[in-house]
Image: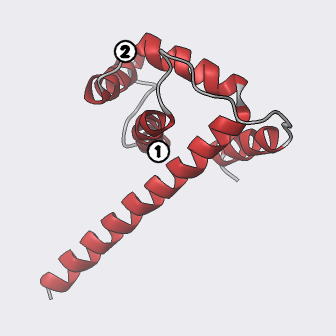
């Protein structure tokens, strides 16, 4: 099993063991909807890195640049993201809900890409 899958399963296990109720999001922390969007973009970057489409080992500044672009696209700062991810990490019920929705978004993107590829193949016939 790939290392990324093991990390994801470990996070899910940790999140499922928590008993605290879902915590309200304080002011200054990114909303769940915004976190879903940001984390979806970040997972796409991490997927590209794991598939060697982006070579992080060549230049760490390069991968830093990709994250900076995500933050610019989303209209947030790195500090806002860091504070928000810290909050959600301390509130695993919220984080679990977010990651479940991130997985749904990634599945939608995958389906769209597969459909586009299928249409392209059919058009070339």
Q: Residues within 10 Å of mark 1 (few under 14, many from 20)?
A: some
Q: Residue at x 27, y 23 (%)?
A: 72
Quadrant of the frame with the C terminus: bottom left
- Is residue 43 positioned above or below 125 on the image? above
**For discs 1 and 2, the disc positioned in front in the rendered view:** 2
Query: Front-most of 21 and 39?
Result: 21
Q: Residue at x 64, y 36 (%)?
A: 95
Percent of width and height locating residue 94: 65, 36
Query: In the rendered structure, which disc, 1 or 2, sits on the residue that comes first in sequence?
Result: 1
Q: Is residue 11 left or right of residue 120?
A: right
- Residue under label 2, please give it: 77
- Is residue 16 positioned above or below 59 on the image? below
Query: Front-most of 52 and 27?
Result: 27
In the drawing, what numbered circle is on residue 47? 1
Q: Secondary structure at mark 1?
A: helix
Q: Residue at x 71, y 23 (%)?
A: 90
Percent of width and height locating residue 22: 71, 35
- Residue 106 position by quadrant: bottom left
């Amino acid at each position: 099993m790939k290392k990324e899958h093991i990390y994801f399963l470990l996070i899910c296990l940790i999140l499922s063991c928590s008993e605290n109720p879902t915590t309200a999001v304080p002011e200054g922390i990114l909303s769940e909807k915004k976190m879903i969007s940001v984390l979806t973009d970040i997972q796409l970057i991490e997927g590209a890195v794991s598939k060697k489409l982006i070579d992080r080992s060549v230049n760490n500044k390069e991968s830093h640049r990709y994250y900076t672009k995500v933050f610019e696209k989303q209209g947030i700062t790195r500090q806002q993201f860091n504070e928000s991810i810290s909050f959600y990490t301390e509130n695993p019920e919220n984080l679990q809900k977010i990651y479940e929705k991130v997985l749904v978004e990634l599945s939608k993107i995958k389906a769209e890409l597969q459909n586009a590829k299928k249409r392209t193949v059919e058009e070339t016939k």
